[in-house]
Image (tube, grey):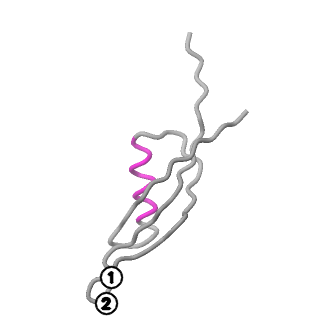
Amino acid sequence: MSVLKVVEILGNSSQSFEDAIQNIINEASKTVKNIKSVYVKDMQVTVDNNQIAEYRVNAQVCFGILDEVVQ
């Protein structure tokens, strides 16, 4: 049986939405193992002087629950 857990994470980047999502994965993978997918819920940008200053992403990271047998 497969069971997944979902955590919601906010990420940002000064480069692009793709980079913001990669930052979420990089940071989440430091403490979360077995990441299966990322669902992007919301994207937005901040604007400074009529230019995009920051890309922001609100995402759900899905990962498998590891079944470990302790003996």
Using residue 26 as the reference point, say whether residue 35 is left or right of it: right
- Tag shown at residue 70: none
**Residues shaded magenta:** 20-30
> Which residue is found at the position 43% from the left and 56% from the top?
24
Residue 27 inside the magenta-drawn segment: yes
Report helix, strand or loop for mark 2: loop
What residue is shown with label 2?
Answer: 50
The amino acid marked with disc number 1 is Val
Q: Quadrant of residue 49?
A: bottom left
- Tag shown at residue 47: 1
Q: Please identify the quadrant where the C terminus is shown.
A: top right
> Which residue is found at the position 55% from the left and 14% from the top?
70
The amino acid marked with disc number 2 is Asn
Query: Residue 16, how many percent across, how many down?
Result: 41, 73
Q: Nearer the viewer, residue 21 or 40?
A: 40
Residue extending furthest toward the left = 49
Q: Assign the magenta stretch its main secondary structure.
A: helix
Q: Quadrant of residue 22?
A: bottom left
> Which residue is found at the position 60% from the left and 39% from the top?
64
Query: Residue 30, how many percent across, how many down?
Result: 39, 42
